């Protein structure tokens, strides 16, 4: 029963290693992964030796094998996995910093473009309003002069050929 559990655990571990292998990003990661995988293979072989001796009821040899190879192998595995975990933490922190920098740059760009667009819309709005109100104010001044002075010779400026210009031309024909 314990052999089945160990076998299932090794299968899950192999599956996890296979999934992680697809995520290996660079040479350092590849090297650390290779070391971890080699030590895991050594550990599996060690486990099979221990298991075989245990089935033969060779308790003293099992204890000696665990002391001579098992403890150093476990320590080596823990150190290698620890280095790999630390490397991944460093890479994660680096990627987080890069992502934050990209986010800040994007925010700055968005705010800059929004400000530029708003300024452009405001300038175009002012120009449009001036373009419309100047000829209308010219016609208004002509109407006020006619009303105030009864000067029917007053003319509205008709400089444009759009609706406002045609209206000024029609007013001037009156």
Image (cartoon, helix red, strand yellow):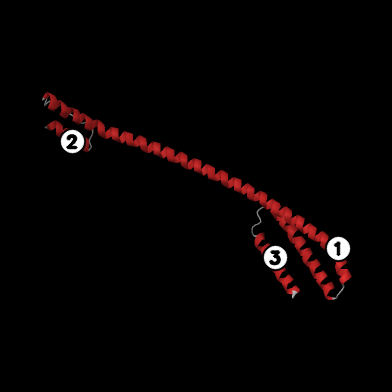
Up the image or down, 65 lies above or below 75; here it is: below
Which secondary structure, mark 3? helix
Q: Which residue is mark 2?
A: 167
Residue name at image x 15 percent, y 26 percent: 145
Instruction: Kindly indicate the quadrant of the structure image that contains residue 130.
Output: top left
Quadrant of the rendering where the N terminus is positioned? bottom right
Residue 45 on image: x %, y %: 79, 67
Quadrant of the rendering where the C terminus is positioned? top left
Q: Which residue is mark 3?
A: 13
Residue name at image x 82 percent, y 63 percent: 70
Note whether residue 40 is visible. yes
**Of discs 3 and 2, which sits in the foreground?**
3
Identify the mark nearer the N-term, 3 or 1.
Answer: 3
> Does residue 102 appear to the left or right of 121 in the view shown?
right
| Label 2 environment density (alpha carbons within 10 Å; few <14, some 14–19, many ≥20) | some
**Of discs 3 and 1, which sits in the foreground?**
1
């Amino acid at each position: 029963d314990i052999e089945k559990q160990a076998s299932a655990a090794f299968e899950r571990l192999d599956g996890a290693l296979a999934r992680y292998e697809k995520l290996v990003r660079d040479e350092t990661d590849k090297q650390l992964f290779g070391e971890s995988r080699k030590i895991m293979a050594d550990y599996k072989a060690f486990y099979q030796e221990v298991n075989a001796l245990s089935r033969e009821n060779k308790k003293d040899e099992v204890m000696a094998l665990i002391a001579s190879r098992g403890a150093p192998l476990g320590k080596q595995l823990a150190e290698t996995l620890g280095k790999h975990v630390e490397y991944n933490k460093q890479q994660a922190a680096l990627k987080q910093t890069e992502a934050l920098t990209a986010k800040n740059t994007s925010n700055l760009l968005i705010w800059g473009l929004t400000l530029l667009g708003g300024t452009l819309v405001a300038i175009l709005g002012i120009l449009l309003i001036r373009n419309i109100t100047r000829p209308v104010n010219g016609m208004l001044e002509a109407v006020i002069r006619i009303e105030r002075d009864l000067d029917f010779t007053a003319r509205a400026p008709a400089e444009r050929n759009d609706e406002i210009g045609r209206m000024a031309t029609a007013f001037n024909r009156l």
